[in-house]
């Protein structure tokens, strides 16, 4: 008698475990998917914001003639552009206040090329800034122009 009661109790224990755990686990899978998209969108936004503040520092250091500091920040920006390329997967077209336009996914190669060019230009800028005849002009051509070129086609007006 005690044996039967015991195994019944065991079954009841597992059944209640399944009933409680199953809806919870399927819910948490959904939550994980949403979180992944949110993390990616927020990550790329924060890298863009960081690049903006870094670009302003680059402008300040370079025009003051502090080329060593300017150059190391240029390299940092160059690397950030490369990191950004992988932060536009197909499931991050919408939501979380993204300003990314659908044109990014319609012209994926062009978008990637522009990101790569922006990265390469920062390396070239770092190599040439010290001997540039017009520092401000070089910053405009090799740094700021790339922001505008990309935003005008791939970022929503804000
Ligand atoms: C090859 C494309 C590309 C280049 C180059 C580029 N951006 Fe952007 N930028 C974007 C896109 C796309 C977004 C929208 C990202 C989002 O909201 O998901 C963005 C967003 C931003 C944001 C807003 C971030 C936020 O918190 O929402 C800032 C600031 C910014 N960019 C500054 C710059 C500056 C400054 C440069 C140049 C030094 C630059 N970007 C170069 C494509 C680019």
Image: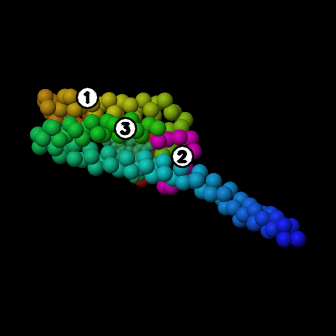
Point out the tag, 3 or 1, that comes first from the N-terminus. 3
| Residue 79 lies within the magenta run | no
Q: Relative to 146, is 36 above or below? A: below
CA separation, marks 3 and 2? 18 Å
Task: Find out whether the residues at labels 3 and 1 contact each other: C-beta distance under 8 Å.
Answer: no
| Residue 95 lies within the magenta run | yes
Q: Residue at x 68, y 56 (%)?
A: 26
Point out the tag, 3 or 2, that comes first from the N-terminus. 3
Q: Relative to 53, is 11 above or below? A: below
* 125 sits to left or right of 113: left
* 23 sits to left or right of 88: right
CA separation, marks 3 and 1? 14 Å
CA separation, marks 2 and 1? 31 Å
| Within-10-Å neighbours for mark 1: few <14, some 14–19, many 20+ | some
Start-end of magenta stretch:
87-99
Task: Please state the horizontal and vertical placement of residue 25, each as a whole percent of the image.
Answer: 66, 57
Task: Please state the horizontal and vertical placement of residue 65, each as a whole percent of the image.
Answer: 11, 40
Q: Is mark 1 within 8 Å of ligand 1?
A: no
Residue 38: mark in rendering:
none
Q: Quadrant of residue 91?
A: top right
Residue 2 in view of the camera:
yes
| Within-10-Å neighbours for mark 3: few <14, some 14–19, many 20+ | many
User: Which residue position holds label 2?
Assistant: 92
Q: Is mark 3 within 8 Å of ligand 1?
A: yes
Residue 81: mark in rendering:
3
Q: Is mark 2 within 8 Å of ligand 1?
A: yes
Q: Residue at x 34, y 33 (%)?
A: 119
User: Which residue position holds label 1?
Assistant: 124
Q: Report the image quarter containing ligand 1.
A: top left
Q: Residue furthest left?
A: 65
Task: Please state the horizontal and vertical placement of residue 132, each as a whole percent of the image.
Answer: 15, 30
Point out the tag, 2 or 1, that comes first from the N-terminus. 2
């Amino acid at each position: 008698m005690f044996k039967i009661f015991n195994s019944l109790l065991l079954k009841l224990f597992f059944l209640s475990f399944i009933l409680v755990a199953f809806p919870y686990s399927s819910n948490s899978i959904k939550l994980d998917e949403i979180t992944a998209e949110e993390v990616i969108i927020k990550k790329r936004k924060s890298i863009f914001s960081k690049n903006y503040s870094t670009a302003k520092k680059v402008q300040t250091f370079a025009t003051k003639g502090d080329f060593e500091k300017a150059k190391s920040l240029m390299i940092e920006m160059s690397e950030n552009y490369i990191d950004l390329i992988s932060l536009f997967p197909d499931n991050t077209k919408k939501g979380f206040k993204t300003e990314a336009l659908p044109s990014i996914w319609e012209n994926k190669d062009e978008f990637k090329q522009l990101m790569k060019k922006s990265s390469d230009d920062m390396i070239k800028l770092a190599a040439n800034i010290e001997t540039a005849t017009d520092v401000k002009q070089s910053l405009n051509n090799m740094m700021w122009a790339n922001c505008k070129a990309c935003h005008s086609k791939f970022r929503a007006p804000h």
